[in-house]
Structure formats: structure tokens, C-alpha cells
Amino acid sequence: MIGDLVIAGCSHRKAPESGLLPALERYAGGIAPQLRARFSDHPHARSRIRFLSAAYGLVGADHLIAAYDQRLEPDRAEGLRLIVNGQLRRDFAANGVPRRVLLVLEPDYLVLLADLLALPERPVLHWIPDPRGWPQAAAVLDEWRWP
């Protein structure tokens, strides 16, 4: 197992610019603004941040995404769970299984990560159910000694 990973839920508020933007720049709500402020000059940390998107599944902080308006509806969640599982497996195969994962997302998004909980090499999970839970997230990142 290697390092740590942060997975945040996407936000309804998004940057209005058309065209493609990195996910960390596209999302304007949740903890994205604080992640952007804290890690804008830390490429390694940014490489360890993911967002769960109702439209795209699991995307890295620097993954280019277009503007969208998609809510995570229950009928979409099950199909998206399979996509996210594949994305996680590819991510872990390429980068290793993280030792710890900080989840900052609403309970509905946990459905998308159900397969993560079933992995035999499952990382330690720290879940903050409030998507605006930056004070708690910052405390975890400080404890982990993230920049």
C-alpha cells in the first residue's frame, strides 16, 4: 500500500466557463475551493485527489472535464458504481492501493464506493459525510502531514 488519497464528492456549483477545466478548477462548492487553495502549488498532492462525479465517475483533480448538470439519482448510482469500481481498480493498478483514504462526500455517494469496501487490501477509510466539512478534512490532512 502506498500513500494516501482524498476522494471528495462533486458539487452542484461549478465554474461557469465553457470548455474543459481541471476538475479541481471546475468544482466551486463542497471542499473544492479549500483543496484548490491549499494544494494549488503541490502537484504531488493534487495527484492524490479525486472527485466522485455524478456524470464522469471518479476523476483526478487535474482531469479535464466539461461543465455539466447531473445529479446522482438512485437509478444512475448502480450503473455508475460499476464504472467507479473499474476506475478505482485501474487507478490502484497504476498507482498502488493507498494506505488511507479520506472521503468527504454525502452518504448517497458511498454507494459508488461499495466495491472499495470489499477489497482484501482495503485502505483505512476516514469518512466525513458533510460535503462542506473542510475543518474536519483539514484536521485529517494536517494529521497526515499533507502540505
Image: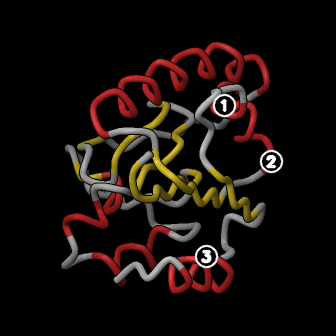
Taking the image as shown, residue 127 lies to the left or right of residue 56, namely right
Q: Earlier in the sequence, mark 2 or mark 1?
A: 2
In the image, residue 10 lies at what x, y percent? Answer: 54, 51
Local SS, label 2: helix
Image quarter in which the N terminus is found: top left
The residue to which callout 1 is attached is: 112
Give the mark toward the camera: 2 or 3.
Answer: 3
The residue to which callout 2 is attached is: 107
In the image, residue 51 lies at what x, y percent? Answer: 47, 49
Can you tell which mark lies on residue 137?
A: 3
Q: Earlier in the sequence, mark 1 or mark 3?
A: 1
> In the figure, 140 relative to 55: above or below?
below
Q: Earlier in the sequence, mark 2 or mark 3?
A: 2
> In the figure, 144 relative to 46: above or below?
below
21 or 112, which lies in front? 112
Please give the name of the residue rendered at 63% of the width and 13% of the height, measured from the top-left corner: 79
Picture colour scheme: secondary structure
